[in-house]
Image: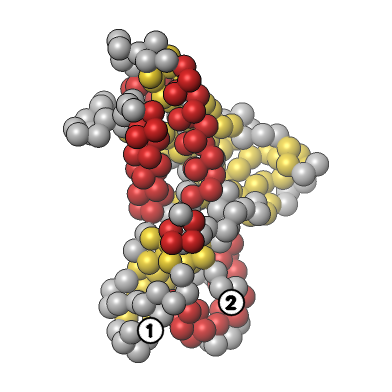
Amino acid sequence: MQVRSLFFAAYRDALGTGTLDVDLPEGATVGELVISLRSRGAPFDRLPKAPAVAINHEVVRGEARLTEGDEIAFLPPVAGG
Amino acid sequence: MSVPARDQGASGYRIAIVRATIDPAAVLAFVGNPADGAMLLFLGTVRDHADGRRVGGIRYEAYQAMAEKELNAIAGEAARQLGTDRIAIVHRVGDLAVGEVSVAIAVSSPHRGEAYQASRFIIEEVKKRLPVWKHEQYADGEAAWVQGRTLESTEDAR
């Protein structure tokens, strides 16, 4: 299945990209997506091991399962207001 | 004009993420109601210093779709606390100069107590929950992302 990863702010700057489509086995979790990305090596190994992640605009835990077409946002610590 | 005419139907509050300058009077005008005796406006502005360094400006970035969803949720929670939906929250993104308004929160209620309570609740939740980031531009030419708060999953936070 394919999911779309979005990277914001400091993460986008570190990775040099804001969007990445990733192929994963069916039923993969957020944690497995993070491992898969980090295993690509530089610069993806600059992502934290347990970043805050939202699936389709909802912040989830690492064990949350992904489904085809999900939008997975990697969210650095926030500083709005 | 940052805040369009009131058109939310069932829920009367108004939220927006905008690029243009925020007009505080327009945000305040949105919540006005003859049944109310208290109107409160909070403005967050860009400071000229941070951790002892001179700041020349801040670039705000948002994950817009999620930020709008969170603002709607926060306004809804505040509306239930306040017992009225006369609430407007506007957050700006893009490049802001020192002194410019980054966030405006207007609430209107029959009495001041609920208005202060709701306004305070909204700004604290905005800082805790909104997927927004600040890139500070310093007077010495350097720039850096501001260290923020880690977002928690809904299950962990409530």
Under tag 1, what secondary structure?
loop
Out of A8 and A49, give the one closest to the viewer.
Answer: A49
Taking the image as drawn, is residue A6 in sight? no
The tag earlier along the polypeptide, 2 or 1, is: 1
Q: What residue occupies the far left of the structure in this picture? A: B9
Taking the image as drawn, is residue B78 in sight? yes
Q: Spatial distance from mark 2 to mark 1, Cα to Cα?
A: 16 Å
Mark 2 on the same chain as mark 1: yes
Q: Which amino acid does label 1 sit on?
A: Ala
Specify few, some or many for label 2: CA neighbours under 10 Å numbering under 14, 14-19, or 20 or more: few
Can you identify the residue that label 2 sits on? A49
Out of B121 and A16, give the one closest to the viewer.
Answer: B121
Out of A42 and B41, give the one closest to the viewer.
Answer: B41
Measuring from the top left, give residue B106's x and y in whole percent: 43, 25
Q: Which amino acid does label 2 sit on?
A: Lys
Residue that appears at 44% across and 24% down? B114
Q: In the picture provided, is B62 more to the left or to the right than A69?
A: right
Q: In the picture provided, is B36 more to the left or to the right than A15?
A: left
Measuring from the top left, give residue A34's x and y in whole percent: 50, 79
Residue that appears at 62% across and 53% down? B148
Where's the N terminus of chain B, which quadrant? top left
- Quarter of the rendering containing residue B110: top left
Under tag 2, what secondary structure?
loop
Can you identify the residue that label 1 sits on? A28
- Quarter of the rendering containing residue B56: top right
